[in-house]
Amino acid sequence: EQDPLVIFTPSGKRGRFPTGTPVLQAARSLGVDLDSVCGGRGICSKCQITPSYGEFSKHGVVVQDDALSDWNAVEQRYEDKRGLKPGRRLGCQAQVMRDVVVDVPPESQVHKQVIRKRADVRPMVMDAATRLYLVEVEEPDMHEPTGDFERLARALETQWGVTGVTADLSLMARLQPVLRKGKWQVSVAVFHDHTGAPPRVIEVWPGLHEGGLFGLAIDLGSTTIAAHLTDLADGTVKAASGLMNPQIRFGEDLMSRVSYVMMNPGGDREMTRVVREALSDLARTLAEEAGIAPELIVEAVVVCNPVMHHLFLGIDPVELGQAPFALATSSSLSLPASELEISTINPRARAYILPCIAGHVGADAAAVALSEAPERSEDLVLIIDVGTNAEILLGDTSRVLACSSPTGPAFEGAQISSGQRAAPGAIEKVEIDPLTKEPRFRVIGSDLWSDEDGFSAETAASGITGICGSGIIEAVAEMRMAGILDGSGLIGSAEQVGTPRCRAEGRTHSYVLFDGSAEGGPLVTVTQGDIRAIQLAKSALYAGARLLMDERGVNKVDRIVLAGAFGAHISSKHAMVLGMIPDAPLEKVSSAGNAAGTGARIALCNIAARAAIEANVRKITKIETAIAPAFQEHFVAANALPHATDPFPELCR
Ligand code: FES
């Protein structure tokens, strides 16, 4: 008689095993992705499976509901203590008795594709670098002189096949009491480096550690620092937060920070210190918010532009301020987080910095490439990560090009007279009636438009505080469409435009969006200076995109992806009216949210993604905007709204 047949779903892997084989063992020998932390001791419950009886019988597999063994004492103990979901079994305990179909639910897969819980947070394919193992360590013996760490290493090797682990001195100091407290059974967090470096023990806990392992995905921008505290078991975001980059006080944009270093010896060290402190503060806040002990944060992945990269790593960025814009290192870095003085996470946590693409195109652009994968796109895609420094990628399966463009902070509400960060109270959406020239708007934190019933009552609590980046873009585009602005970006007078909302300000004019001054509230206007700031920023963006299109020899792209926390909020119609982006059918313009942040999360959750982006970055063609004469030409022509010479046929449709 043949051995029973076991079919695993969803993988479809199958094989015959002697009666009595534990399901976990069958899964292992077939290479089925079934998790286990305790190594089959019946205590971690990571190995849960669902036998699905009878379903495949019509295909010739006779499946009976006694196909798995009855519950044994270990499984029963688990059920009594913790309980299993109906229909679930522990894969390490249940044994194969007859032909059976076994389903491995997503939460029991190591390489799980996690179900999307929030529309704006992309599910991750998991393969975390740091993994947890429960081991039984041999007790010391007078006749065997090995150390506790060596016996721990041996246990990892014999029980899990993890060979050659190393650890910091600080781990050795912690190990002895933990081993004894756990009665020689300990959970070990081991970091597996994709570079082939020996695995490192990051932390040990007595007994079974059930508090989870977490990582930080950090998008270190010139203006804002954003971080996601992520569960390394399933990629879910436990807390997300951001703060202003404290380096702003040394210079608003990157080049002014480089100049600060040139003029103030030691200025780089000051900037390194403040950004590292800010990161530590952010990590502490996130851990508190999520109710997680700092020691459980065992990894951090950082993406940033080249100047931030150098300043964060403690490298003088002066070389990046002048041609040929040499990076101290363009490779990815895998190093102890303590070297970067991130002090509020596990002291042995690891940090990974994505590779830089070039002297002006940083690890943030690499992260965008990881998130949006232009190299896998069949059609030609233009990806613009809008920020103080915009990262631009253009490509498809044949070739990918990248550049960055100094847009400045106008899109983030800086350098705008009534500008502010996107926060409650900021005007974020604007419409202007082309006939009456009267505006209506919406404020962050309110669902109502300003002309809807109940608006003033609802906003009274928070009040209107200013206008954010997406609001100013909509305002300027609406002003252009309503004829308040001409093609050169000049605001007309009240007489020219026919609206009392245009007020003279010296020799120029401004447009009043909201005047609450009679009630002691703010006056929110769009001034001629604001328009100029937006024109400079959008011209830089457009010129960068055109430069890549020139290089690729195209006049049109198939689709456009707007990325960046801010890119997610821009209306594509308004962006195109302004000429921020090249002409394209509006339905082909989409938003990717914070793609650099998503790229950081992908690299945090999936070790293979680190190797993949390192290989991909080497294939990307870098275009240097700062020294390209065509960039200047494109920049000047792009100053007009939408453009001096490029036709925008899609806009006219
Ligand atoms: Fe841990 Fe089954 S492997 S409970």
Image (cartoon, rainbow, N blue to C red):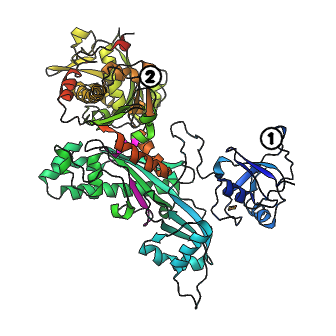
Element type at mark 1: loop
Give neighbour class at mark 2: few <14, some 14-19, many 20+ (Cα, 10 Å): few
* Amino acid at dot 2: Lys
Q: Which mark is residue 235?
A: none
Q: Which mark is residue 588?
A: 2
Classify 396 as above or below 577.
below
Would the CB of label 1 be found within 8 Å of ligand 1?
A: no
Q: Earlier in the sequence, mark 1 or mark 2?
A: 1
Q: Nearer the viewer, residue 37 or 490?
A: 37
Q: Position of residue 610 (x, y in %)?
A: 44, 50
Answer whether residue 354 is magenta in the image: yes
Q: Position of residue 234 (x, y in %)?
A: 57, 50
Q: Position of residue 373 (x, y in %)?
A: 44, 37
* Amino acid at dot 1: Phe
Q: Quadrant of residue 177?
A: bottom right
Q: Nearer the viewer, residue 109 or 33?
A: 33
The quadrant of the rendered image in which ligand 1 is seen is: bottom right
Tell me the chief SS of the magenta region: loop
Classify 50 as above or below 544.
below
User: What residue do we see at 26% from left, 42% from top?
Assistant: 360
Answer whether residue 489 is magenta in the image: no
Q: Quadrant of the C terminus?
A: top left
User: What residue do we see at 48% from left, 25% from top?
Assistant: 448
The residues colored magenta run: 343-367
Give neighbour class at mark 1: few <14, some 14-19, many 20+ (Cα, 10 Å): some
Relative to 452, is 271 on the left or the right?
A: left
Q: Is residue 252 visible?
A: no
Question: What residue did someone put label 1 on?
Answer: 56
User: What residue do we see at 53% from left, 87% from top?
Assistant: 145
